[in-house]
Every structure is written in C-alpha cells, then in structure tokens.
Amino acid sequence: MCIATSVGRGGRNDLADVAAIQILLNLNRNRFPRPKPKALDTDGRIGPNTLGRIEAFETAVMQLLESDALIAPGDATITALLAGLPAGPSREKLAIVLPLAAASKIARYFEPLKAGMMKYGITTPLQMTHYIAQLGHESMSFLYTEELASGAAYEGRKDLGNKVAGDGQRFKGRGLIQLTGRANYTAYSKFTGIDYLSDPTLLSTDPMVAVDVSCWFWKDRGLATLAERDDVKAVTKRINGGYNGLDDRMQNLRRAKAVLGL
C-alpha cells in the first residue's frame, strides 16, 4: 500500500500519505477529460484543491456515481491510481516512495541511482524496493549524505579501523547508506581504485559517489540475499546494527512495493 492511513475529507491526512496521493493524482492527469487539470502542489497538505481532485478522479475517471473524497489504504481508488502509472522507472515514482523528498533531491539522485543499481545488480523487484526503502530512511529522503554528529564518538574504535588520531571525525558516516570508519573507507577505495582516504568528503558531496558507495555496501554486506527473502528486519539490522527507524523503513518499503506492483 502506498499510504498507511486515510487521506481526504475526515481522514487522518498524515503529511507523507497526502503527498503520495497528490503525486499519484498528478501522474494520472492524462486520464481526466479535457481540459486536463493543473498539477497539484505536492506539499502534503490536505485542502480544497486536493479534495476536489480526489472527487474528480473518482467520478470522472473511475466513473463512480458519487465521491466522499476519502481514500483508504488498499481501496479501489488506490488501485485505480496505481494502474495509471507509466511504465518504467521515473522520478515521479521515486517521489511516491519518498514523498517527503524535495524535488531537487529526487532530480539530483535519480540518474545516479538508475546507473548504480544496474551496475551492482540491484535489479530484482524485491532488491529494488528494499534498497530504496533503506536509502530513504538512512538519508532522511535524500536530505543528508553526511552524519550530523561530529564523529568524535568513533575515535579509537578498533572495530572500525580507526587507529590514527582524528579518524573518528575524518571517517564519520557518509553516502546514502552512511559508510563509517577507516577500515570501510579503505575497503571501498581498494574496490574502486580511487583514494577516498585523502578526501573522504567526496562520499557525501558527489552524488554519483554517494550512490555508488551505498550500492557497494549493499553488495559487499550480502544484503541482496536478505532482500530476496523479503526480511526487512534482517536488512535493517545489517545496515543499522539494530532496528532504529524500522517503522519508517517499512513505510518506505510498502510504498515501493505498491509502485512496483508487489
């Protein structure tokens, strides 16, 4: 299901759910009779424009006799909206999975994600859905590619290979799945043949690298096997070391599955 709670008149109207419905309604504009409606603002706020568009979709497109302007998870309106999605990957579909992501962030990472997922074989439906779901949480919908904390807490961590003074801050978490520690930066540098030890900030500032390192991590840690089992708890624990943000990761996963028809 691409929404977790009700959206519309009298609905719960959670920000992410409303934004997902707004994006879906915009993607179905070509199904409306002429003149085609203007695109809705995908701001996650319920209002007369969004309510009116829900009503219009249910009556003019779905041919219902009347509309209560209320959409529930998994109902016929959701099914009809998903049926109107264009084939193939698109920025708009990615925006449905991560409805709180800024359009500029979607544009920044969409092409690198397509290239990186193809390069590393993250191409089955279950892998793609789990991968994007985890990335969405780890980066807070592409908002952050560098850990907000200073990294001082990692100082002297032998399990991360931090053996030189300042390694904690120098090799703090970066990338869309935050790579942490000298040992991990060294392993990624050896894999790519590029020295990221001398300039570790490239993992956060270069969108191609931020995506590539997350794909490398996915493959290197054997996450493909866990994703193919559809085990979101196991995928989360291998990435996070625990279950922080599990509900949010599951929300992303549900939306991703809905977009891919799983």
Image: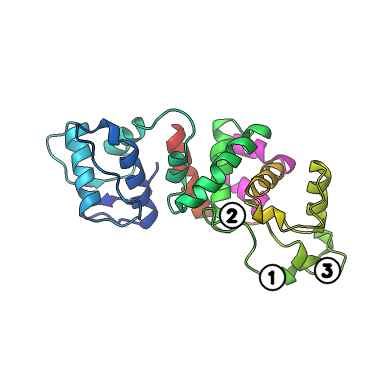
Q: CA distance from mark 3 to mark 2?
A: 24 Å
Stretch in magenta: 219-240
In this view, the residue farthest toward the right is 163
Q: Position of residue 139 (x, y in %)?
A: 57, 55
Badge 1 is on which residue? 150
- Amino acid type of disc 2? Glu
Give whichever of discs 3 and 2 has the lower sequence position. Answer: 2
Structural crowding at the residue carrying mark 3, measured as other residues with C-alpha within 10 Å and reported as few (<14), some (14–19) or many (≥20)? some
Q: Quadrant of residue 163?
A: bottom right
Q: CA distance from mark 1 to mark 3?
A: 14 Å
Badge 2 is on which residue? 138
Q: CA distance from mark 1 to mark 2?
A: 17 Å
In this view, the residue farthest toward the left is 65
Do residues under tags 1 and 3 come within 8 Å of each other at their CB atoms?
no
Image position of 180 (left or right of 131): right
Question: Which residue is rendered at x = 62% and y = 46% of the image?
Answer: 235
Image position of 214 (left or right of 261): right
Question: Which residue is rendered at x = 61% and y = 34% of the image?
Answer: 228
Badge 3 is on which residue? 156
Give whichever of discs 1 and 2 has the lower sequence position. Answer: 2
Q: Is residue 150 visible?
A: yes
Relative to residue 122, is residue 165 depicted above or below?
below
- Amino acid type of disc 3? Gly
Give whichever of discs 1 and 3 has the lower sequence position. Answer: 1
- Amino acid type of disc 1? Ser
Residue 235 in magenta stretch: yes
Q: Is residue 178 visible?
A: no
Relative to residue 65, is residue 253 depicted above or below?
below
Q: Secondary structure at mark 3?
A: loop
Residue 129 in magenta stretch: no
